[in-house]
Structure formats: C-alpha cells, structure tokens
Amino acid sequence: MIELKKAQNLLLKNLRRMEKEILRLPEAIGRVSFEDIRSNEDLPSFNRSLMDGYAVRDEDVKTTPCVLKVRGIIPAGKIFKGRIKKGECVKIMTGAVVPSWAERVIKKEDVEVIDKESVKILRIGWDRNISYKGEILRKNEIILRKGEVVNEFKAALLALFGVKKVKVYKKPKVCLITTGDEIVFWERKVETGKVRDVVSLLIPELFNKIELPCKHLGRVKDRKNEIFRIFKKTNPFDIILFSGGVSMGDYDLIPEFLKEIGAEIVFHKVKTKPGKPLLFAKFKNKFIFGLPGNIVSSIVSFYNFLRPAVLYMMGLEDVFVKFYEGFIEEDIYIKSDRLYFVPSIAKFKNGKFYLKELKFMSSQDVYSVSRANSFIVFDDGIYKVKEGSKVRFFLL
C-alpha cells in the first residue's frame, strides 16, 4: 500500500502531455496554451487621447485662463496631419490619435466654448490625459505563457493584438468500463443482490465539470473474455477507466487482466479511506485507472487522481485539489489506519470556514456525499478532534 503523496508523484512522473492542436481564438477559451505568445506591437500602438477635449502645446497654456483658436477636429480613428501656430489648438475625441506636437489634452469640462473657432482654457489639471505609445506593453513582451489557461480576459488581450488562432494542448479522450456480475443499468428495477450502476452516471458528470467528455463503453460481467472483448473498443482513447474489479476478491480480475495484456502496473492500493483499491497502470501510450466499485471511493479517487491526471495532460501544472483550513463545529472521533476523507458541509462566516462532519456508514453511502460540499482530511490513527479544532479540507 502506497502513501497518497507518493502515489500522486508517481502519477505525474508517468503521465505525458497531450499533443498540440490549433484552434480559432473563440474556441480556444478555456484551453491551455501550448506556447508563449508575444505582443506584435506596442500597446497602445499610438499616443491616444483619454478624454474628449482639446490637444494643446504646453507653451500655449502656461497661464490660464487663456483663449486659443480651434484649427480642426480629430475624431477617433482619424489622423490630424496639419501643424498649428502659436495660440492654436485642435479639438480631439476620446481614443483619437494625439498629434506629435501636442503635449497634453485639456478635457472639455475645463474649457469654455466662445464660438466655432475659439475656446477659453479655464484651467489645466495635473494629468496630461494621454496614453502614450507602449506605456502598457512594449512589442515582443509575453502576453500569454505556455501552460496558462486562455480565459475570457486573456482572449480579449489576444484579440487586441489581432491573434486569430492559438496553439493549445489537446484534450485527452477518456472512456469508462463498469464491471461486476451484480451491476445492472441504473434505470432498471433491481433484484435482491443486484446493484444499480451509479458510477456510469457519476464519473462522466464529474468530468463534465471540467468540460471533458467521458464515454461509457458499457458494463461487463466478471469474466476475462468479456473484459477482453470490451477492451478492444478502447483504441481511440488516451485514458481507460475500469470501475470495480480491483480489490482482493476471487472475481476482481482487472489486475490479472492487465498483467496478461502486458500493461505496467505503476501502483495498486493507496493508503486512503475510502479509495484504497485504486490502481494505475500504463499500456503502450494509454493510461489505465482501476477505480473501486464503491461510489464514495470513486469520488475520492476522482479528486485525488483522475482530475489531476487529465488536467496535467491538458498542460496545467497546479493540478491537485486546493486545501483550505477551517474549524470543526463539533467533536469528531477518528479511527482509521489510513488517511481519512470525510464528507462535510463547509460554511464561510466572518472570514473563516466552519465545517460540519456528515457521518457516513460506508464507502457506498452516497446519501451523505449528496449533501456535502467538501471533504475533510484526517491523518490516520485513533484520536478525538475537539470542537473548534483547525482541520484541512477541499471543496467539491
């Protein structure tokens, strides 16, 4: 049995990044950049007026109030090519190109219009009201780094520089196979001894939360020939998930099956409760996970291993769940020989998290998890956690 942290390190060590694909900018939102992207020009690319007002030279407004003649108007998107004489100015709109001779823009609120050809400058402020060429970004600066997510704000920045297409990491293709003689389709009426296949609904929905499809290939009995048959359908996929068949029973055939096809089992059994039977293997260019058949075990395994695996393959670095600290609302008695994950309700009050344990009967107790928004993590051992104690947890 392997410690969680060691298993997670082995996971990342053995995974590979996905190849690149090129997407149009709108389709690349939410994906991870495959390369650094640099600015192809200064930002702004010209001296830009920040106000509606009047472009002037400093020498003409040394003393205010003063009267200046208006030589013309500069709308946004147009360029004023003329020159002005002493005592003259040009009306200018927000966003317009500031002429090279202009040293400041007097905002219209500080100007009194005398007639169509002359204005009185009442005052000048401390701000020149000009955004200078390159003051935000210089040409060839990195605007999106390799491994960064192209979110809506990054996409807006890229669009500002005219970037049409982005190289991103491909998404891995994931499939799920559920195993077990006792498993039946979740919509069916069950006989005594049978169990509805909830995992085939749950796991794909958990992947949907990170916008990654997970195709359920079907259910098979605990028979090697059936496992071989359905495994032939996994060729298009990068990650193959087996639900069930990884514990120590006579009908838990997945480890034996993997050895027979020549897969390398990287680790099997993790020191967590629930989630102990988890298996991770490599086969050719594919990665195989054997998930415990119990529902809560599958959830814990998803957050500890499956989610980090696909995020890493998609180009991200910080892939494991983020732990927070909070305070327990009532005494809890711990008795576990493994790292213990307990479903809980986390509430944020007065700048702090407070957590309430949701007692669950077994790793099949999906009722408790259905009310949870978090998992508290306790070290192994036999001990009491007193009310008000600080605990670690992650949010679902």
Image (spheres, rainbow, N blue to C red):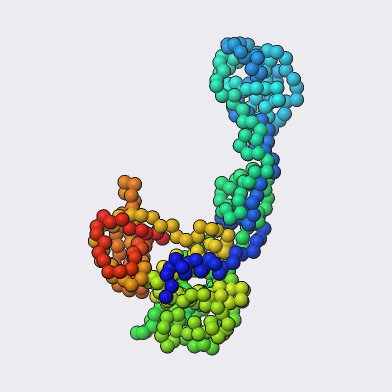
Residue 385 percent across, percent down from the top left: 26, 61
**Pick the front one: 157 or 144:** 144
**Pick the front one: 257 or 173:** 257
Quadrant for the C terminus, please: bottom left
Residue at (26% x, 66% y) in the render: 383
Q: Vertically, is 153 above or below 279?
A: above
Q: Vertically, is 41 above or below 234?
A: above
Displayed quadrant of residue 62:
top right
**Pick the front one: 368 or 309:** 309
Residue at (52% x, 77% y) in the render: 265
Residue at (72% x, 29% y) in the render: 79
Residue 320 visible to the viewer: yes
Residue 120 percent across, percent down from the top left: 60, 13
Q: How many marks?
A: 0
Q: Vertically, is 309 above or below 290?
A: above
The furthest residue to the right: 82
Residue 164 percent across, percent down from the top left: 68, 50
Residue 42 percent across, percent down from the top left: 67, 38
**Pick the front one: 357 or 204:** 357
Residue at (31% x, 71% y) in the render: 336
